[in-house]
Image (tube, rainbow, N blue to C red):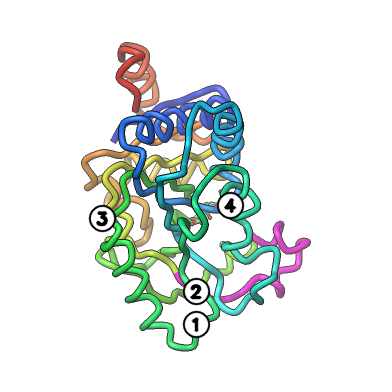
Amino acid sequence: MEVVILDGAQTIGRLAADAITDLLQRQPESVLGLATGSSPLASYDELARRCGAGEVSFKRARGFTLDEYVGLAADHPQRYRNVIDTEFVSRVDFAPGAVRGPDGLAEDIPATCAAYEAEIAAAGGVDLQILGIGTDGHIGFNEPGSSLASRTRIKTLTTQTRLDNARFFDGNLEAVPTHCLTQGLATIMSARHVVLVAAGQGKAEAVHHLVEGAVSALWPATILQHHPHVSVLLDEAAASRLQLSSYYRDTYRAKPAWQGI
Ligand code: F6R
């Protein structure tokens, strides 16, 4: 796991965007794993800018989102399908239908989850997965207690996650759905490169467990310690509880710039 401590969200966004840009330049038909929420927004802004400037193209790429609320109406602005379209997909040049997500309105939830797994596998798996992390250590919506071997399925959101996300629902906790469909931890672990971005003091405890804690279903993101290629991009506040932060800084400083993450 490589830990990179940077001076703010814009710098984090640029480094994550560099990893995606490099990948698409090497392999234009790559499969991207897309997260919603605030964490990846700076990367999406930067990629939209680069796409507009002709520096990167998503024309031959495909995308799979991580998760979706159950039961939000198709036109609800906080439905993750709509959020990712607004924040990213509509701002770059993906081909129509190239970005897929789990269907939170499906009648047969086990069948839709199995079909989503099959779709990701048929696309050849995810080359680069962008992740945020919840204050309770979730990735995707794999809440504490999730099976470390889980695949796409329905989950109940914790009250903590619903409180955290109430800001997207005018601060109204009751409006935040109680359930979601999410790629499982094993699904996320199948991605070839995972780029996790986190900023702010609120993420410091979860980041401490992710990087330096014991692997445990109590902090689901810790499963990433078993992944061979994870880049964790942090601001100072999110990194503030790391014991080995000077080591991570020295290591990254000594790395040749051409190497990327
Ligand atoms: C979103 C997702 C979640 C978020 C996490 C952090 O698709 O899967 O795991 O990444 O809840 O959310 P933000 O970035 O809003 O702090």
SS at badge 4: loop
If you read the primary sequence from the N terminus, does the residue marked by circle 1 or circle 4 appear first?
4
Q: Amino acid at mark 2?
A: Asp
Circle 3: element type: loop
- Identify which amino acid the numbered label 3 is placed on: Gly
Q: Which residue is mark 1?
A: 106
Q: Which mark is residue 9?
A: none
Q: Is residue 179 magenta?
A: yes
Say if disc 2 is inside 8 Å of ligand 1: no
Q: Is residue 166 above or below residue 134?
A: below
Q: Give the residue at x 40% y 46%.
A: 61
Which numbered disc, 4 or 3, marks the residue closer to the eye?
Answer: 3
In this rendering, which labeled residue sits more in front, label 1 or label 4?
A: 1
Q: Are marks 2 and 1 in contact (CB under 8 Å)?
A: yes
The answer as to whether callout 4 falls within 8 Å of ligand 1 is yes
The circle on residue 103 is: 2
Q: Identify the residue under disc 4.
A: 37
Label 3 belongs to which residue?
124
Q: Which residue occupies the foreground of this view, 27 or 199?
A: 27
Foreground: disc 3 or disc 2: 3
